[in-house]
C-alpha cells in the first residue's frame, strides 16, 4: 500500500506531469509529419481514405502488441486484463481508436487540415466538461475555462498563420472531425475511470490491438490496399507504432493519478508541435513565423493557468 501511495505522489508532482505530458505531445506532434512521410514511402495518395484507414489499423494493431510486450517486461509477468475489464477495453477501443481515427480520416478527406486542427483543439474543452459535468470527477471553475480559452487561441493562431480558412460546414467534413474529437474526449475521461481497477498500460495495449484489427477490416472492406512495401516504409511504420505505444500508455498513467483537466490541457501542444516538427522534417519553413511563437506562448500560459494550484 505504501509503495502505491509513493507512486501516486510521484506521478502527481508538477514536474512529472509537465515532462510526461510534453513528451506525449512531442511524440504525437512528430506523428503529423511522419504520417505524411509514411504515405509517400508506401505510395498512399491523399485521396485514398480507406487505404489510410488500413495503414492506421496496421499501426495501431502493432502498437497494441508492442505495448503489451513492453508492459509485460516491465511488470515481469504477462499483462492480461481482468475478466470484468473486457467490456471496458471494447468501449475504449471503439472511442479512442476506431471512432476517433475513422471519423478523423473521413473528415480530413472532406475539409482542410487547418480547419481539422482547429476543430480538434476543442477536445480539451469537451474533456473538461465531460469530466466535470457528466462524471463529476472534478469541479469546473473559471480558472480552467480561462486557461482553456487562452490555450485554444494559441491553437487557432498556429493554424491560421499564413492560411486561409474558408467558411462552411459539411457533415462528412467538419462534422466527422468534430465526432472524432468527441470520441477522443470521452475516451480520456473513461480511461481515468477504468484505470482505477485496471493497469492503464493493459487498457492501452489491448484496446489498441482490438481497435487496430477493426480498422484493418474496415479499410479492407472499403477497398483499401497497401501495394508498395519498402524497408524505409516499414521503419517509419515501426516509429509510428512506438509513438502510439509510448504516448498513449504514459498519457493513461498520467490520467490515472491526476485530474483530467490538469492533463488534457496539454493537448493544445499537439498542433503546435505538429507545426514546428513539420517545418523541420518536411522543410515547411514557411509555417514558422512570429505568430507561431505567440501561439506557443499562449498555449503555455493556458496550460499554466489550468494547472495553477488553488489558494
Image (cartoon, helix red, strand yellow):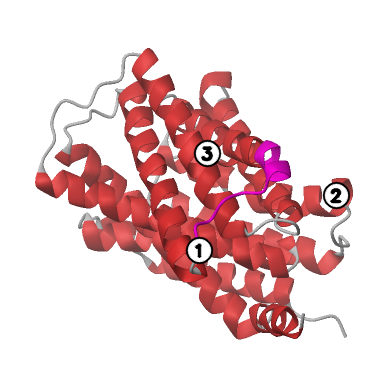
CA gap between label 2 and label 1 equals 33 Å
Image check: 148 left or right of 250?
right
Q: Is residue 40 magenta?
A: no
Which residue is pictured at 71% across the width and 75% down the height?
307
Image check: 234 left or right of 308?
left
Q: Which circle, 2 or 1, is nearer the viewer? A: 1
CA gap between label 1 and label 3 equals 26 Å
Residue 290 in percent (x, y) is at 40, 69
Q: Quadrant of the N terminus?
A: bottom right
**In the picture, residue 149 is in which quadrant?**
bottom right
Check disc 1 and report the residue beneath it.
77
The answer to whether residue 151 is seen in the rendering is no
Which residue is pictured at 27% across the width and 44% down the height?
36
Magenta span covers which residues? 77-88
Q: Secondary structure at mark 3?
A: helix
Check disc 2 and report the residue beneath it.
135
Amino acid at each position: 500500500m505504501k509503495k502505491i501511495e509513493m507512486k501516486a505522489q510521484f506521478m502527481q508532482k508538477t514536474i512529472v506531469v509537465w515532462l510526461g505530458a510534453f513528451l506525449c505531445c512531442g511524440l504525437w506532434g512528430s506523428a503529423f509529419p511522419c504520417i505524411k512521410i509514411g504515405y509517400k514511402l508506401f505510395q498512399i495518395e491523399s485521396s485514398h481514405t480507406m487505404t489510410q484507414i488500413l495503414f492506421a489499423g496496421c499501426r495501431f494493431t502493432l502498437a497494441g502488441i508492442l505495448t503489451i510486450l513492453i508492459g509485460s517486461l516491465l511488470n515481469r509477468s504477462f499483462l492480461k486484463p481482468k475478466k470484468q475489464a473486457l467490456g471496458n477495453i471494447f468501449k475504449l477501443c471503439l472511442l479512442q481508436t476506431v471512432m476517433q481515427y475513422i471519423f478523423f480520416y473521413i473528415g480530413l478527406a472532406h475539409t482542410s487540415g487547418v480547419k481539422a486542427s482547429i476543430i480538434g483543439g476543442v477536445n480539451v474543452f469537451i474533456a473538461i466538461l465531460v469530466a466535470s459535468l457528466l462524471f463529476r470527477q472534478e469541479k469546473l471553475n473559471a480558472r480552467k475555462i480561462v486557461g482553456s480559452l487562452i490555450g485554444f487561441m494559441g491553437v487557432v493562431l498556429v493554424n491560421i498563420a499564413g492560411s486561409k480558412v474558408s467558411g462552411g460546414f459539411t457533415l462528412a467534413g467538419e462534422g466527422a472531425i468534430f465526432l472524432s474529437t468527441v470520441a477522443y474526449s470521452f475516451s480520456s475521461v473513461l480511461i481515468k475511470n477504468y484505470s482505477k481497477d485496471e493497469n492503464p498500460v493493459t487498457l492501452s495495449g489491448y484496446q489498441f490491438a482490438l481497435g487496430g484489427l477493426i480498422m484493418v477490416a474496415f479499410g479492407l472492406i472499403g477497398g483499401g490496399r497497401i501495394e508498395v512495401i519498402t524497408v524505409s516504409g516499414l521503419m517509419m511504420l515501426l516509429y509510428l507504432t512506438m509513438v502510439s505505444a509510448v504516448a498513449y500508455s504514459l498519457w493513461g498513467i498520467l490520467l490515472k493519478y491526476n485530474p483530467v483537466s490538469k492533463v488534457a490541457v496539454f493537448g493544445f501542444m499537439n498542433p503546435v508541435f505538429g507545426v514546428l516538427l513539420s517545418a523541420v522534417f518536411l522543410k515547411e519553413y514557411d509555417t514558422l513565423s512570429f505568430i507561431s511563437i505567440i501561439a506557443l506562448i499562449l498555449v503555455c500560459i493556458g496550460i499554466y493557468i489550468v494547472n495553477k494550484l488553488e489558494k
